[in-house]
Amino acid sequence: RRHAHSIPSFTHLNAVTHDDLAHFAKILPPNAILSTLPPNLNSADDLVPYNVDWMGKYHGQATTVLRPRTTQQVSDIVKFCASRRIGIVPQCGNTGLVGGSISLQKEIVLSLGAMNSVRSFDPVSGVLAADAGCILESLSDYIARYNHIMPLDLGAKGSCQIGGNISTNAGGLRFLRYGSLHGTVLGLEVVLPDGTVLDQLSTLRKDNTGYDLKQLFIGAEGTLGVITGVSILTPPAPRASNNIFLALPHFKNVLPLFQTVKRQLGEILSAFEYIDRTAYDMGLEHGLGPILNPDEVGDAQCFVLAETSGGNHDHDSEKLNNLLESLMSADEPLIYTGTLSQSPGQFASLWALREGLTECLQKEGKPYKYDLSVPLAEFQNVVDAVRARLISKGLYGDHGITKVMGYGHVGDGNLHLNAIAKYGYRPELEAALEPFIYELVASHKGSVSAEHGIGSMKTSALRYSKNDVSIEWMRKIKHVFDPLNIMNPGKVLPSV
Ligand code: FAD
Ligand code: MLT
Ligand code: ZN
């Protein structure tokens, strides 16, 4: 059922045996081990939450899932797996979109979800230390009482966990304001592939004492070690948040709009998100709206959601009101219409239309998801080129791809291109999309993964964004940390 590229065979790895389970039972209590093997004999259904990804695209074959509660237990498990050459797939919320959290062969799944305690929070510095298995939204709720927010936010916040966020170097909706996890993560505790605990759970803002090892694990997608603890800088909650939703007649207006919005809103601009017409209509069909008057929207080609986070609600909404007025009254208006949220409920519903798109896609069929960095000016061209390609191949329509759409974090140059296969993933559809899309991205000197990662989906596409020398040094780093290649094998790096 798996529909990834060719599946590597792991001749260097062993499958879990009855004896191995007996050893794991010495490390973990019975309820922390799930296995289809005797003596546990869990059903395959029990393992589905760990063996199937969020999209239902990747189907793993793990026979055994381990759910440790302590770093020591993780260390003991990893040490044993290294001695027995058993592959390990670290897993947190299993919301990743590139197949990274799913086993390729018979690796065990090491689920961090039971390690879910906050370790400390300093309300003065805003530094939060937490177990890797804490759900992002739970951490947001925890620090809300101190008037702080997490520096990242994403549609999967209710399920994804901070260790997974860091392992994928997740971007999300606050990237424009608070930047990358490479900046906000201050320290990590990592169990290395031989079982050693690397304690770098620093809470220091500044630390120039040589190589910054923790950076290697941010975005490593579990290929270099298991993140067990995290220390992260959280900003004070903005006193006021507002948002505005705008309908644009043409895609070409997005860039001048972005410039105008940045100029007029200045430092209070905190998000600038993009939705094309196909995505907007899909959202409405699934009940996410309407938030704009359909008569005023007319034939708008695309939409922008901008958010402000500032210190004074009245001041910020006046700025947004002035922005809206000036946009509407210009000689050649950049927008058809727009709406400014007037209440927390409206603020949430404007965001719901943007954040809800990922789930709508799942309801429409099976989405092929491409998470690209390309120049802003090319967003629409890239989407149009992919649609044209499918039409030319006779694969556009009810029998193949029913919709091609773009949305994303336009303020960060990150386009989410999605193609929906109404009746499921099929090799000929994938062959029409790949490597075509990757070649297109490379022609714009873009990235084949802006924020979702490489996982197992894009190992063969890595070369479109990384040159041979870079890949060679990535391999060397992998070998230094994981010479036995037990840690998430077959992910990120292409097989040789
Ligand atoms: P998992 O899916 O469990 O794992 C992801 C990868 O990290 C895997 O390779 C896994 O092996 C590795 N890993 C997990 N835990 C550890 C660990 N403790 N140590 C080492 N390696 C580990 N991504 C964005 O960047 N921006 C978005 O806006 C965004 N929105 C999303 C919206 C929805 C509705 C969904 C379903 C996904 C979205 N994503 C987004 C994808 C994103 O990558 C994840 O949601 C999130 O960062 C993954 O966290 P997770 O806990 O689910 O990790
Ligand atoms: C988003 O920005 O909505 C997420 O990255 C998920 C997706 O690409 O659908
Ligand atoms: Zn995104």
Image (tube, rainbow, N blue to C red):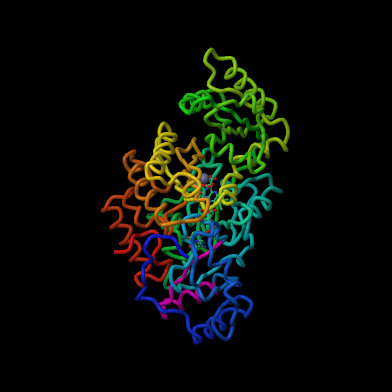
Q: Is residue 399 above or below residue 252?
A: below
Q: Is residue 2 above or below residue 82?
A: above
Residue 105 visible from this viewpoint: yes
Q: Residue at x 49, y 40 (%)?
A: 406
Residue nearer the viewer, 275 or 489: 275
Residue 340 among those drawn in magenta: no
In the current view of this chain or complex, which residue is farthest to the top? 331
Q: Residue at x 37, y 45 (%)?
A: 393
Residue 230 visible from this viewpoint: no
409 left or right of 210 in image: right
Residue nearer the viewer, 143 or 286: 286
Q: Residue at x 53, y 41 (%)?
A: 178
312 left or right of 406 in image: right
| Highlighted range, magenta | 72-92
Residue 77 among those drawn in magenta: yes
Residue nearer the viewer, 79 or 469: 469
124 left or right of 367 in image: right
Classify the position of the C terminus by image quarter. bottom left
Q: Where's residue 359, x and y in %?
A: 59, 49
User: Would you identify the image quadrant in which residue 354 lies?
Assistant: top right
In the current view of this chain or complex, which residue is farthest to the left? 469
Q: Where's residue 256, x and y in %?
A: 47, 24
Q: Where's residue 274, x and y in %?
A: 53, 35
Q: Where's residue 224, x and y in %?
A: 41, 63
Magenta span dominant secondary structure = helix
40 left or right of 400 in image: right
User: Would you identify the image quadrant in which residue 378 lies?
Assistant: top left
